[in-house]
Image: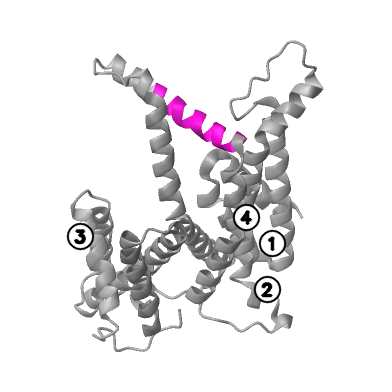
Amino acid sequence: MIEILIFAAVSTLLYRLGMGPLLFLIPLQVLYVRRGKKSFGWAALLTLGLILAIGLFLASRFPMGGADLSGAAMSEGALSQAALTQAAPFLFLDMAVAVLLIGGLALIQLPEMSPELQIPRLPRVTRHIIATAIAGLLCVPVILYLRGNDIFTAGMREFIGTMFNGMNRAIGASGGDAIQPGAQPIQTDALLEIINTVLLRSFLFSYFLVLSFSWWLGTIIGARSIGRHPGLTRIADFKLPDRYVWPLIASLALVVLNLVLPAEPLAILAWNALLILAFLYGVSGLGIIRFLLRKLNVRPGVRWLLIMALVILAMTPRIGIVVLILVPGLGVSEVWLKYRKEERSNV
């Protein structure tokens, strides 16, 4: 029980430190590998309870959404109630993210967690994609609720406005031309629309990355902590089945079609699918590069340096876009050009 409490506390702490969607799943996955589904379940429930309790406490003490809750006539109880009302959509989003991520982590391992259900053990990549698709469907009511909530919209607009004020002061302090106050509302709304568009077109891709990374790293740490081999497919052996090229072509076609016939639901679906598949083919491309380097007897240290150089180049302006096209393109080309002839593990 002590171990469950410790791992749940670490997950909650990571979440509340702002690392939530990036790291908070890793302790839960480590615990699952070490102790099994029962410990994972209790730790997951405890983590969600702690996240909610801390969120309620912070909301009652630090009002959100830009509401004026400082009236002298308001009692402490009324003040707390008003603060919680203002914080409700933010707490809802906070809990929705945590529930969807923990639920996705359980879903991709459901055949191992509950063998009595006799669920087919699909390839790992397929499981992650299915979990992401289910999360996307469950996100629809969340997005509709937040879009129609005036408190949430006002809170986001206030956040963007505060950011612009900070930029204005920084520019003024540096001797530059400050942002004109009269232009700020237009800039705030425009930036809010850009953020909304970017988030919607990449949120499932982000979910897929966080879920996959947390499962991968948590599995490695958990297995090594008990002296066991993780049993994961190496990057040099990672290859997508050839059939995945058709969803890639379809998502790319939908992105191009959306440029001619704009439709927001179509754009959201197409961009998220394209980013996920491009990432997977990018990993496959890196696998080809590692395989070829190993075949050429390049030393392991040099191999890793070359891979890291590619990653750094991918994050470099101008050059990055070329790398981000060529590496996934290399992975796609293996549909026709069989670079790796050796037997590979199932992905």
The quarter of the image holding the C terminus is: bottom left
Residue type (three-letter) at the residue carrying disc 3: Val
Q: Is residue 260 left or right of residue 345?
A: left
Majority secondary structure of magenta residues: helix
- Location of mark 3 (residue): 322
- Location of mark 4 (residue): 141
Using the rendered view, name the quadrant where residue 263 is placed.
bottom left
Q: Is residue 4 left or right of residue 207?
A: right
From the viewer's perspective, is the residue at label 2 or at label 3 nearer?
3
In terms of secondary structure, where does tag 3 sit? helix
Position of 24 relative to 103 (above/below): above
Q: Is residue 134 visible?
A: yes
Using the rendered view, name the quadrant where residue 61 is placed.
top right
Q: Position of residue 155 (x, y in %)?
A: 56, 32
x 67%, y 46%: residue: 9
Identify the mark nearer the N-term, 2 or 1: 1
Q: Position of residue 190 (x, y in %)?
A: 39, 37
Residue type (three-letter) at the residue carrying disc 4: Pro
Q: Which residues are magenta?
A: 151-165
Identify the mark nearer the N-term, 2 or 4: 2
Identify the mark nearer the N-term, 2 or 3: 2
Query: Distance between the Cα atoms at labels 2 and 4?
Result: 28 Å
Q: Is residue 28 left or right of residue 57?
A: left
Residue 160 forms part of the magenta stretch: yes
In terms of secondary structure, where does tag 4 sit? helix
x 25%, y 79%: residue: 333
The quarter of the image holding the N terminus is: bottom right
Residue 276 forms part of the magenta stretch: no
Query: Distance between the Cα atoms at labels 2 and 3?
Result: 42 Å
